[in-house]
Every structure is written in C-alpha cells, then in structure tokens.
Amino acid sequence: MNISKEQLDDLNAVVTVDIAKADYRDKVENILKDYRKNANIPGFRKGHVPMGLVKKQYGKAVLVDEVNKLLQDALNKYLTEEKLDVLGNPLPKEQENFDWDSDDYSFEFELGLAPKFDVKLNGKKAITHYKIVASDEMIDNQIKTIQKQYGKLVPKDAAEKDDLIAGTFVNEEKEIENQTTISLDKIKGKRNLDKFIGSKVGDVLTLKTKGLFSDDQDLVNALKVSQDDVKDLEVEVNFTISEINNQELAELDQELFDKIYGKDAVKTVTELKDKIKEDADRQFVQQSDQQLLNDVTESVLENTKFDLPSEFLQKWIQATGEQPLTEDQAKDEYEKSEKGLRFQLIEGKLINDNNLQVTFEELKEFSKNLIKGQMAQFGQMSPEDKELEDIAARILSNQDEVKRISEQLMSQKLLGYYKENVKLKEKEVSFDDFVKEVYK
C-alpha cells in the first residue's frame, strides 16, 4: 500500500491511496473460506460447497467490504501520523473508469485543511466590561414587592386605583373564558382605568383588548392566549368581577426580616436594602459576564482574519447533508455556519495555546459546586462531601450532562483568560441603562 499527498494550496490537498492485491488477498481468502464452511446452498452439503461457487456468489461483496475497511483504516492512520488538521471529512473524488475487477486500486480524497493564524484579542478600542448595579428605584421596587408578597388582602366593596380585581374574561367568538386576578396598576390608559374605578362585585365591564395592558405579556396571562395571537388580537371582552381586594403591605419590621433572611440576619431597613443590593449585584454579574463573552467573541472574529477552504466545505456540506442539497443550497448553509466555524477554530487555538483544556477533576469539582449551590437554594447549606461526590458521579455518567457542564466550565475558563488578556474598560451602569445600551 502507498499513500501520497499533493498540496494544492495552503487550504486544499489531495491524498491518493494505492492498494495492491497483496494488501487484501489473504484477508479476503480467509473470509471466503469461513463462508464456505458455513454456506447453505441447495445441492451441496454444508462445508462442501465448491470454492468457485462461493467466490462467484460472495467474492465481490467481500472484496469491496475489505478494501473499504483497509482504505479507511489507512487514511485515518495517515491523517493522524501526518498531523493533518482537516475540516469536515475527506471527500472521495469521483473516478470515471474505476473497475472492481482489477487487482490493484487507486483512491483519491480531497482534503480541506484548517488555516494557520494568530488570534488577535485586542482591536483599536477597549471592550466595555459592564458592572451592573441595582439602582435605588430597583431596590425600592423590590422592597415593595416583598411587602406585597408577605402582606394580606383586605376585601372591598368598590374598586380604587392599585386594587386587585378577580374576575372572568369572556369572548365567545374567540373562545376566550379565563378566570384571573389583575392589578389595576397594570391597566394602560385613563379611559380603561376609569371603567374599573368604582366598579363592584357582579359588575360586567366591556373592554377592548388592544391597549388594555401596558405589557402584552399581561394580556397573554389574563386571557390565556398565545403570544402570537396577542399581536393581532383586537376584540371586545366582557370582564365579570367576582372579587375586589386591596393588598395591605406588610410592615418593615423584625418579624418580616426574619421571615425573609432568618433570625436577626437583617435588623434594619438600611440592612435590608444592603442585602437586596448585594443579592441583585451578584445576579447581575452573570449577565455582565455573558455580555463580555459575546462582545469579546465579536471583537476577536472581527480582528482575526484568515481564509477557509470554502469551496471544499460547500462540497462537503452538499455530500454529507441529511437531505439532498443543490449547490446553491449548500452555499447558503455554508454562509450560515461560516461565522460559527471561524470562532470554533479561534476558540480551539486559544484553548490549545494556553492550556485551557478541561480535566476530569476540574469537571467533577465544578459539578460539585453547581450541586452545592442548588442545594443551598433549598436550605441545605452544608452537605457532606460524599453526598456531593455521589450526586456528581450520577450526573457525569450522562454524556449529555457532561457536554453541557463542560461547556459551562470552558466558558468560565475563557472568561477568566479574557479578563486577564483583553483590553477592557469597566463601566458602572444601572440594569435599565445596561439594557438600553446592549439591546438598544
């Protein structure tokens, strides 16, 4: 057997595998001998079928199968030994005059090679690293939410602003009939709110769905319709009031503080605000870090330039797709996936060049910390290490979970690398300002 490579350019090559009769003859003969021992052919005793008949019936199939096995093994070994970094898989070239009746065979494979490049982490401008902080307004709103959550409902005869109204929305044509409770502070517009103010239990209000709530999601919840249906929903609904309540806020006292955070963990309103701010800022770190990952990814893609074997990759997509694709369809698929492929190559180079690979021990410790955090949410603050080990072992026996957790850990490693090596400028913003800047 002989294998040779023709380098067409930096990104494309052709590998030729020559297989001679001596490479496969003994293997094919031995398989056919086994076939002869076990063949059941009418007119012949088992094990006494003429070899010529066995070869005629099974010879070509065995030959093709064994040559293909030999071919794949040889090709894979060659790619490994030569350390060829290929994209996709080798594509066999069509050969017009190929003949399985020959003794010797020659196979050609097209290769798309990964480009060589240097990763450019930094562009001309520093990347913004947002530090999201809870505003005073957000903290006050959270305190109000807590007071409502732990407060009590006081029944009323007539509705006033900010009351809670229970009732049923009905529209027979659209098959809407849903019992719900709405807060009048969610109602949009003075005209709509005036219909509720002064209403009593048993009253039936006729309302237009368009512009009824400040947020479409509130209309989705109130009518139990889909988000898509709400976009074009413009009908009248009847709302029959069954209950009117005022939500009396809980007092900001030690009893409330203990219910939320445990005995004496918080003792004053100032400490409560500090605790809420601390919890909120901790949650915002995840959003800030995710945005930093996104921004660094875009920056690196923009600054790290290299060519890809695009024609080869389009042919590979066309040849390996689950459904038959035309050249134009394969080109479209390639264009959709090109950006992702580029970043995979960049990310792989960063990982290899900086030894950021995930080890099993790191994966296990990371899994245990995730489990510990989840258990803490349910009040189990100090689980034993053996319990964490057992749970982690069960989780890591699932390959899908291993993939998911490995990706999380790798994101953390890359994030740490970026924070140390990318030119960043920190910017402190409120959550609302962060949303405005990032999502515009």
Image (tube, rainbow, N blue to C red):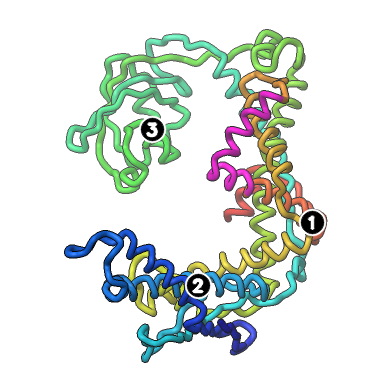
* Marks 2/1: CA–CA distance: 57 Å
The answer to whether residue 157 is above or below residue 164 is above
Q: Residues within 10 Å of mark 3 (few under 14, many from 20)?
A: some
Query: Magenta segment, which residues?
Result: 386-406
Q: Residues within 10 Å of mark 2 (few under 14, many from 20)?
A: some
Residue at image location 73% in from the left, 62% down from the top: 352
Can see residue 314? no
Task: Pick out the residue farthest to the right.
Answer: 420
Of callouts 3 and 1, the N-terminal one:
3
The kind of residue on which mark 3 rests is Asn
Rendered-image quadrant of the N terminus:
bottom right
Q: Which residue is mark 1?
A: 425
Magenta stretch: includes residue 88:
no
User: How far across and down, in percent of the image, does residue 33 sit?
Assistant: 38, 67
- Circle 3 residue: 221
**Most extreme residue toward the bottom, as rendered?**
97
Q: Quadrant of residue 195?
A: top left
Q: Which residue is mark 2?
A: 70
Q: Earlier in the sequence, mark 2 or mark 1?
A: 2
Q: Quadrant of residue 418?
A: bottom right
Quadrant in the picture for the C terminus = bottom right
Looking at the picture, tell me which residue is in the foreground, 41 or 384: 41
